Image (spheres, rainbow, N blue to C red):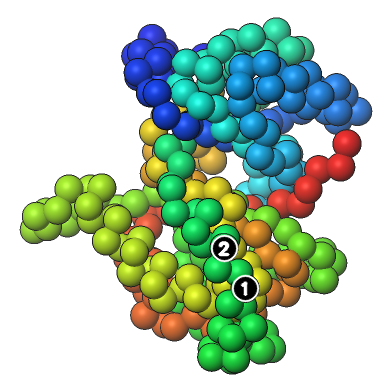
Amino acid sequence: MTNPSNQQRDQLNSINESVEIVQFLAIKDSNNIGNYIEVAQRNVREFGGVQEHVLNIDQVLSGMGGKEINYSVLTINQFPSGTQLLKYYDDLAAERSAALASSYTLVLKPESNIQKVKRLRFLAPLLRLKFRIGEIGEFNEEVQLLQPERNATLEMISDFQTFDQEEPFYNINLNKHYPVPTDSKLSIDEYYAEFSAETARVTGPRVLSIGAFPTISGKIIQIFSRDKKEPFHDDWDQFLLVYYPKREDYLRLITHLPIEIIEKRNEAYERAIQMPCTQLNL
């Protein structure tokens, strides 16, 4: 497992605001996962962090061409600074080596508007009436199902439907942007901020209408523990975790999105992975 480089350490030590560490874990012995998570939780608290999520990765829904990944558990923790995050990561090195076959680590700069979005959940009944997102609709095969590097395929959706559709779940979104068009006068941050704002304006109310909401969203500022031979590992730009009250809500949502939003998403993202997860009960 690769550790952060000296350059990455210098960058993290210069960050004096909240950062989040997202870790995909491949466990050597599933019977010992509880012990590792317990030790990791103590370390999070010791270095001033907050444990946000411990999730079981149920499947890969899109972006891997039908291939699965080695990682089965996702943890997300927030720290008040990059230095505290590094102390946590380094102090856990021995336990990580003993318990994990491999790991893949992302460091995020969290978006500040997530809490504002959560507070709008009370609007769900009104928005549900406005958008009339009722039964699961039909998939647009040309736009949705034939874009496996970005969207869920019909085969993966069939696998998704084998889980209890009445149970809540979280959906991981890992997004890799296309390069900014050469004729654009905007920086990459400005260009994709504009795209994200437009997408949120159209899809945000629809997401809220079914009771779903983002819990974590952030720009990926560092990646370590990376193996370039692993197809899951990529130069990801954005991480998003969305909570859905029911699995069927996700299917209701994606079959009622305006076609222009789906097309714009396909134009903006070179690659996008989605992975449904459920709370890990230890």
Total numbered labels placed on residues in the image: 2
Q: Amino acid at mark 2?
A: Arg
Of the pair 101 and 191, the residue shown nearer to us:
191
Q: Residue at x 78, y 26 (%)?
A: 37
* Residue 21 vertical placement versus 119 (above, below): above
SS for dot 1: helix
- Residue 220 quadrant: top left
Mark 1 is surrounded, within 10 Å at the Cα level, by few (under 14), some (14 to 19) or many (20 or more) other residues, namely few
Say whether residue 237 is left or right of residue 73: left
What residue sits right under mark 1 in the picture?
Answer: 122
Q: Residue at x 70, y 8 (%)?
A: 94
What residue sits right under mark 2 in the picture?
Answer: 119
Residue 45 in the image: state x and y as whole percent: 69, 22
Q: Residue at x 40, y 15 (%)?
A: 13
Say whether residue 282 is left or right of residue 45: right
Q: Amino acid at mark 1?
A: Phe
Of the pair 201 and 69, the residue shown nearer to us:
201
